[in-house]
Amino acid sequence: MFGKGTYFAEHSSKSDLYAKPDNDGIRRTLLTLVCLGEAFRTKSGMTEFNMPPCAKCSLEIRASCTCPSKGDTFDSISAVTKDEGGSVDLPEHVIFASYQAVPLVEVAYKHHAECVCNLCRRC
């Protein structure tokens, strides 16, 4: 929804939506330090982006930006939540360079039969 980067969530429940269980029902997610730098805050999708937008005009740097100093980009993209006029329920961030993220630990967990989280209530 916000380009071809690596997505991170502030809330584990958001990551849980994407963590597919293995044959034993174990899901895995990473607790990661992420350096967003100067983030471009967007209220709508930006699917065509392969890198953060231009820091001056906020357009896609390769196809749309006509600024003379091409190459000055934001460091990441942050999606604005619906309660702030954006398009996502929970905050999410996208980076485009692997050096911006440092995985700290893998978290393995399992939803139990009596689980009442939003994901389990949908099933």
Image (cartoon, rainbow, N blue to C red):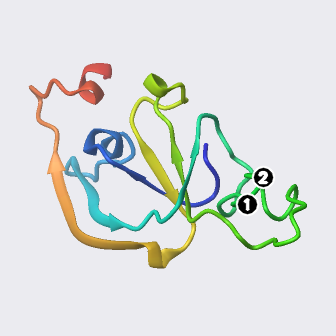
Write down the residue under mark 2: 59
* Observer-nearest of 51 and 59: 59
Q: Residue at x 74, y 58 (%)?
A: 56
Q: Type of residue at label 1?
A: Cys
Q: Is the residue under label 2 in contact with that under label 1 (CB below 8 Å)?
A: yes
Q: Residue 54 got which mark?
A: 1
Mark closer to the chain start, 1 or 2: 1
- As drawn, is 80 to the left or to the right of 17? right
Q: Residue at x 47, y 52 (%)?
A: 93
Give the x, y percent position of residue 17. 36, 39
Q: Secondary structure at mark 1?
A: loop
Q: Residue at x 71, y 70 (%)?
A: 72
- As drawn, is 19 to the left or to the right of 36? left
User: Label 2 crowding class (10 Å Cα cut-off): few <14, some 14-19, many 20+?
Assistant: some
Indicate the quadrant containing the C terminus: top left, top right, bottom left or bottom right: top left
Give the x, y percent position of residue 104. 23, 72
* Observer-nearest of 7 and 81: 81
Vertical placement of residue 93 versus 84, above or below: below
Distance CA(mark 1)–CA(mark 2): 6 Å
Q: Residue at the far bottom: name it.
A: 99
Vertical placement of residue 119 versus 64, above or below: above
- As drawn, is 120 to the left or to the right of 2? left
Q: Residue at x 30, y 43 (%)?
A: 16
Give the x, y percent position of residue 97. 54, 73
Q: Secondary structure at mark 2?
A: loop
Give the x, y percent position of residue 35. 41, 68
* Observer-nearest of 109 and 57: 57
User: Label 1 crowding class (10 Å Cα cut-off): few <14, some 14-19, many 20+?
Assistant: many
